[in-house]
Amino acid sequence: MSDLVYARVQSHFARLKLNRLPDCLDPIAEEATKRQATYIEFLDHLLSAEIAARLERDIAMKTKLAHFPVIKTLDGFDFAFQPSIDERQIRELATLRFVNHGENLLLLGPPGTGKTHLAIALGMLAISQGVSVYFLTVADLLDIVHRDAKEDRLGHRLQAFCRPKLFILDEMGYFPLDRLAAQFLFQLVSRRYQKTSLIITSNKSYGEWGEIFADQVLASAILDRVLHHSTTINIRGQSYRLREKRQAGIFHDLTLPGKEE
Ligand code: ADP
Ligand code: MG
């Protein structure tokens, strides 16, 4: 390959914004020569490198935008520890059919039983399939709603929260939702209804949701929409957080508030 052609190929890469290829061209061309690859095989190898790099960039960007507090994976989840969880059901959810159909998922159970872990792990899987995800705790939702109301930005926020295909609302039940927050959540749930997915985690059963909301009517209107096309996973079991402490004999039979056993 003459220097002139080589320089032109590099400038084509730049014009076509094939940003991974300038670094890949030499090793892939050498490899193709060594293996006596066909032109098509060489091209396939080159384009695959660009696509892999773009996918990686997209995942990194979407992960940043999702605002996960930590990264968790399904592989890191010990199903043997939590026998009330049906692994097959989680694997079915991991196909993300529910996200593609705009359905919701509710993960209910006592603290430390892996609700947030599973929500984030499913969120990460969604991102790996190109789905936009946003993670928010109810405590942060309350802060945001009250700040935005003062700045007259609630409408704008609602629009922004309707955009991600999968919205994860974590820790429903630890803080009461006042009227403003409940109204905002109702609008969010109504706008997203049947179009985009919600994962909600809660330490409270549905019967107790009325206590979380200042307004019973809003609570049942929200639940009605959330539950219409949804799957509920009821986790009953021990806190994973306290497992090591229990193993060390510090706690024997710890009864936690909200524990459903
Ligand atoms: P919850 O949201 O139900 O309160 P988390 O999902 O935050 O609980 O779990 C608490 C901690 O224990 C996290 O670090 C999580 O990764 C871990 N954990 C919980 N359950 C499991 C499990 N079955 N396998 C592995 N790690 C777990
Ligand atoms: Mg949690």
Image (cartoon, grey):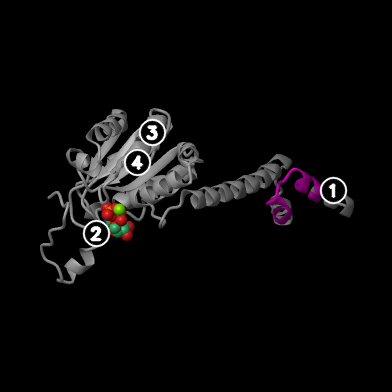
Is residue 170 among what the camera can see?
Answer: yes
Q: Nearer the viewer, mark 1 or mark 3?
A: 3
71 or 189, which is in the foreground? 189
Q: CA distance from mark 3 to mark 2?
A: 35 Å
The stretch in magenta equals: 10-25
Q: Are circles 1 and 3 on residues that touch, CB within 8 Å?
A: no
Q: CA distance from mark 3 to mark 4?
A: 11 Å
Q: CA distance from mark 1 to mark 2?
A: 58 Å
Please identify the quarter of the rendering in which residue 44 is found.
top right
Residue, disc 2: 240
Label whose residue precedes the other's in the sequence (1 or 3): 1
- Disc 2, ligand 1: is the CB inside 8 Å? yes
Question: Which mark, by number, is residue 236?
Answer: none
Secondary structure under badge 2?
loop
Q: Nearer the viewer, mark 1 or mark 2?
A: 2
Query: What type is the residue that disc 2 sits on?
Result: Tyr
Residue, disc 3: 187
Q: Residue furthest left?
A: 253
Residue, disc 1: 8
Query: What type is the residue that disc 4 sits on?
Result: Leu
Label whose residue precedes the other's in the sequence (4 or 1): 1
Q: CA distance from mark 4 to mark 2?
A: 34 Å
Secondary structure under badge 3?
helix
Residue, disc 4: 180
Identify the residue shown where x is 68% and y is 47%: 46
- Disc 4, ligand 2: is the CB inside 8 Å? no
Q: Nearer the viewer, mark 4 or mark 2?
A: 4
46 sits to left or right of 242:
right
Q: x%, y% of residue 101?
A: 40, 29
Secondary structure under badge 4?
helix
Q: Are circles 4 and 1 on residues that touch, CB within 8 Å?
A: no
